[in-house]
């Protein structure tokens, strides 16, 4: 949204040797985006199938029926479709299932199937008759067995030729919507079944839902013929199998021991221990299994599987402990590091009578322990309260293993030495530090104010539907959301959501007024609660100004009539972006307008509602801020902060080459942005340089949330910019937040190498998609002395979505490339950015003497609105929130 700049206030400083390495590298990149200043941005290449046309117009004169297909018909359709990269990635059963949806088209002579430059809708295969292909004055003829129009199964790009029948013809055809829906249903069915299998397997019980999701993503389907041997007794194995169809027979010393059927599994010892197979397993029928290897599990979970199981069990025990749950992730890591796994047979003593109660922590990982009052089971923690209370008394009885039992044991003195303090004091201060580090307003708290927080802060839990604050009630508490989502209602009208690490309740305390809105919990919610007396003590004049400014934004009385247009500064996915200023205070804003004609034509009602809801819940200094929305008879409007800067695409051109530390700075900023979004289940789905603004401080701000979605499971929409789209989006496999990590990997390759890794010279999405699926990542040449960054890019660009994060966002942050990186200073925006755009104030434009509506109307007058009207009537009250 900024203007192009050729001047910067900070020039990159490099050593002579590093400069020569960079210059010689970039001389090799003749096709580099950084050298080709005339290269087009990829903003307009965004693919979006969220809005499928409701009526199919191709071959409009044909008689369409669900005719039974002969074996020859099926083979011809298969042959034609197998050249399509989406189709050829499906197994044979899925291919046949899709062919069931292919319809028969009977059409007479000299009839048009489709015209050149019309949007594509369907794929066709000729069963009988001849057709002519007319393209820019040239003519060719096609006949039986020929497929045409396959690109329409990707998107609605214009047809490159006109196809017309020469004689009466018989065709097989399938439209894009039906094709995509068929694939979606197949993938949803497979995903649901695979998820049920994983959830039913005992050894996976301790895993988190996210870890289970990663395993589901990594499962490989295998087929075996009746009588084939899957594993042999005595062999070293590393694969675990789940039976999806059929059954197997297990032999030990050539003697049949058991039969396993659908839903059962074998080979689990291969995941836990690198031991020989204890049986031979043979397919008793034609068989389909799901498999996953030990190495794959280590890649996606970040550790050995056995360690993960115990690690997760310890984490649950820590979370259940009222003392230990307040430890930071780093401190929890220290506790795990100081813990040792001990195994006890039934009847053995785990804690001896006479030992000091505050000497050690014991967490039960497996089995059962008999205590003084009752039996203690998995996830119980022994000694935590005693450590917190500094209880130096002794145990009066032995703690004995009832069954074979595994425990994690940590000596308290060793753990506290690692922490550098006592557990109970550290736990309390962690609560305060957690707030201070995540919420801008508290980052500069004095020591005394921090102590006040420690003294007064408490945690409250609210169930789904609980009213936390009621409008018109007295205000006596300030709330910070630790986890969960709350909804804000004013006069019973929904306003917005507030999410993790955001806050509410300051208004009535500051102004000593009644509550201005009702706040209701959506699902379970945990809040830090600060009473009014402590709030008044902590909040100084500077903080009050910050709160009041935020309240002004929320209460903004700005109307469209208050805004004067200056000039058009960009286009979003669906609308125009105009630089405007307030008539009274000259404050600059960016306003995005979307015409109701376009909304109706593209049927994007739900998209705009979702975009508004997502943007209103985001409050991060590296993400563009939505001030408010408007509506009138002609348009919907989004009023946003104006970012005075350049997009990253232009910044990279101006920088010419990017030093490694500079690349690392941008990478770290993107990790912080992605972490913030994914914490709230928001997936952007279009990360690329054009959607990242570098502001006048040199820090990035993510913009354009027209493609964003809240995803808690999987989604199937084909959406994004081709060069940055993840493989699982392309093949319609279903995807989650990992697609943002893939786009991040493409972005980092582009920052470092000056071009995207797949299809950098191509504009045709089909060719780009094929190269992405080939995944031939070229990292042979390096612009830097070191090579550590390469493994970071390789991880992000893994074909396996589950492997991209390496187990967690903390694991991603601890990648060796980020060794010694100061994440805390980045959060405070204290790190010196590599490039600060110098953008002189420019409020000249051709709109200053016009109303905003008049100015936008002139821009829209030069646009072409789609002639595909998929929504003839606006849904009732769809814009009530605007």
Image: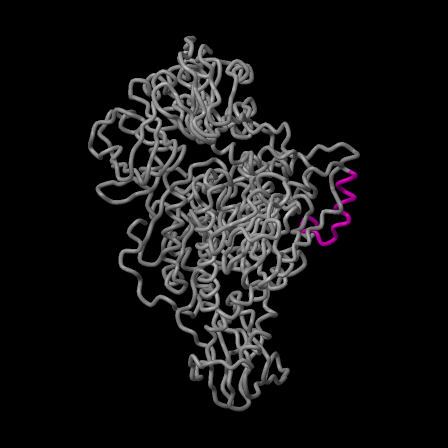
In magenta segment, residue 23: yes
667 horizontally vs 640: left or right: right
Quarter occupied by residue 483: top left
In the rendered image, residue 737, in percent from the top left (x then y), is placed at 49, 47
In the rendered image, residue 429, in percent from the top left (x then y), is placed at 44, 18
The image shows residue 576, relative to residue 462, as above or below, that is below
In the rendered image, residue 875, in percent from the top left (x then y), is placed at 30, 60
In the rendered image, residue 350, in percent from the top left (x then y), is placed at 48, 20
Q: Residue furthest top?
A: 392
Q: Nearer the viewer, residue 747 or 90?
A: 90
- Residue 810 in sight here: yes
571 horizontally vs 466: left or right: right
- Residue 747 in sight here: no
39 horizontally vs 174: left or right: right
The image shows residue 622, relative to residue 863, as above or below, that is above
The image shows residue 717, relative to residue 361, as above or below, that is below
The magenta-colored residue range is 20-35
Q: Nearer the viewer, residue 254 or 779?
A: 254
Q: Residue furthest left?
A: 472
In magenta segment, residue 678: no
Residue at horizontal 68 percent and vertical 48 percent from the top: 754
- Labels in figure, total: 0
Residue at horizontal 49 percent and vertical 16 percent from the top: 360
């Amino acid at each position: 949204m900024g203007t192009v700049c050729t001047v910067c206030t900070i020039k990159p400083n490099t050593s002579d040797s590093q400069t020569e390495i960079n210059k010689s590298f970039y001389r090799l990149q003749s096709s580099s985006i950084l050298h080709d200043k005339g290269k087009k941005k990829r903003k307009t290449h965004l693919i979006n199938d969220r809005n499928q046309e409701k009526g199919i117009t191709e071959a409009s004169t044909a008689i369409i029926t669900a005719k039974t297909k002969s074996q020859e018909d099926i083979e011809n359709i298969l042959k034609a479709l197998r050249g399509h990269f989406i189709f050829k990635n499906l197994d044979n059963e899925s291919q046949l299932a899709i062919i069931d949806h292919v319809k028969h088209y009977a059409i007479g002579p000299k009839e048009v199937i489709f015209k050149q430059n019309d949007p594509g809708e369907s794929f066709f295969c000729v069963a009988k008759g001849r057709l002519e292909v007319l393209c820019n004055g040239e003519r060719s003829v096609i006949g039986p067995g020929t497929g045409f129009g396959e690109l329409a199964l990707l998107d609605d790009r214009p047809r490159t030729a006109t196809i017309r029948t020469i004689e009466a013809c018989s065709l097989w055809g399938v439209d894009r919507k039906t094709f995509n829906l068929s694939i979606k249903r197949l993938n949803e069915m497979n995903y649901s079944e695979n998820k049920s299998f994983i959830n039913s397997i005992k050894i996976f019980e301790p895993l988190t839902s996210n870890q289970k999701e990663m395993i589901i993503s990594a499962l490989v389907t295998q087929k075996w013929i009746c009588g084939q041997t899957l594993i042999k007794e005595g062999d070293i194995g590393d694969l675990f199998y789940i039976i999806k169809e059929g059954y197997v027979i297990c032999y030990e010393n050539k003697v049949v021991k058991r039969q396993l059927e659908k839903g059962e599994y074998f080979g689990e010892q291969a995941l836990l221990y690198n031991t020989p197979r204890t049986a031979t397993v043979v397919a008793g029928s034609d068989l389909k299994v799901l498999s996953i290897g030990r190495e794959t599990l280590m890649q996606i979970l970040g550790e050995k599987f056995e360690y993960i199981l115990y690690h997760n069990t310890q984490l649950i025990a820590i979370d259940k402990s009222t003392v230990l749950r307040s430890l930071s992730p780093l401190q929890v890591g220290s506790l795990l590091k100081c813990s040792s796994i001990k195994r006890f047979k039934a009847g053995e003593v785990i804690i001896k009578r006479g030992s000091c109660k505050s000497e050690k922590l014991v967490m039960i990982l497996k089995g059962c322990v008999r205590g003084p009052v009752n039996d203690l089971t998995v996830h119980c923690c022994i000694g935590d309260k005693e450590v917190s209370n500094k209880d130096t008394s002794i145990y009066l009885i032995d703690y004995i293993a009832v069954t074979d039992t595994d425990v994690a044991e940590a000596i308290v003195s060793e753990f506290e030495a690692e922490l550098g303090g006592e557990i109970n004091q550290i736990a309390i201060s962690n609560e305060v530090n957690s707030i201070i580090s995540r919420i801008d307003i508290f980052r500069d708290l004095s020591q005394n104010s921090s102590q006040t927080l420690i003294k007064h802060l408490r945690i409250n839990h609210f169930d789904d539907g609980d009213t936390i604050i009621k409008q018109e009630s007295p205000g006596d508490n300030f709330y910070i959301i630790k986890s969960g989502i709350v909804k804000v209602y004013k006069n019973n009208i929904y306003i917005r959501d507030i999410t993790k690490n955001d806050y509410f309740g300051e208004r009535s305390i500051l102004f000593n007024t009644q509550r201005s809105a009702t706040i209701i919990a959506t699902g379970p919610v945990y809040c830090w609660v600060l009473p009014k007396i402590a709030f008044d003590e902590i909040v100084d004049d500077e903080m009050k100004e910050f709160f009041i400014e935020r309240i002004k934004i929320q209460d903004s009385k700005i109307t469209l009539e208050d805004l004067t247009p200056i000039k058009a500064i960009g286009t979003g996915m669906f609308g125009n972006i105009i630089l405007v200023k307030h008539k009274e205070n000259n404050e600059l804003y960016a306003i995005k307008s979307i015409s109701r004609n376009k909304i109706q034509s593209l049927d994007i009602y739900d998209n705009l509602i979702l975009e508004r809801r997502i943007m209103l819940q985001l409050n991060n200094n590296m993400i563009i801020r939505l001030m408010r929305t408007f509506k009138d008879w002609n348009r919907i409007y989004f009023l946003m902060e104006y970012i005075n800067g350049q997009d990253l695409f232009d910044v990279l051109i101006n920088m010419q080459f990017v030093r490694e530390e500079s690349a690392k700075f941008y990478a770290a900023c993107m990790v912080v942005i992605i972490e913030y979004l994914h914490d709230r289940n928001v997936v952007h789905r279009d990360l690329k340089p054009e959607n990242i603004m570098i502001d006048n401080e040199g820090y990035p701000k993510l913009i354009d949330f027209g493609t964003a979605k809240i995803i808690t499971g999987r989604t199937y929409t084909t959406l994004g910019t081709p060069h940055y789209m993840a493989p699982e989006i392309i093949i319609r496999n279903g995807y989650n937040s990992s697609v943002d990590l893939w786009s991040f990997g493409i972005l980092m390759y582009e920052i470092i190498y000056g071009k995207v890794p797949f299809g950098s010279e191509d504009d045709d999405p089909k060719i780009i998609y094929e190269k992405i699926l080939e995944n031939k990542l070229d990292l042979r040449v390096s612009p830097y002395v070191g090579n550590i960054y390469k493994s970071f890019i390789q991880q992000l660009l893994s074909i396996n979505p589950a492997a991209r994060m390496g187990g967690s966002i903390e694991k991603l942050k601890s990648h060796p490339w980020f060794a010694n990186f100061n994440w805390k200073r980045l959060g405070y925006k204290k790190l010196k950015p590599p490039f600060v755009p110098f953008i002189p104030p420019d409020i000249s434009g051709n709109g200053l003497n016009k109303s905003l509506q008049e100015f936008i109307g002139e821009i829209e007058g030069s646009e072409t609105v789609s002639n595909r009207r998929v929504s003839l009537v606006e849904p009732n009250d769809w814009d009530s929130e605007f």
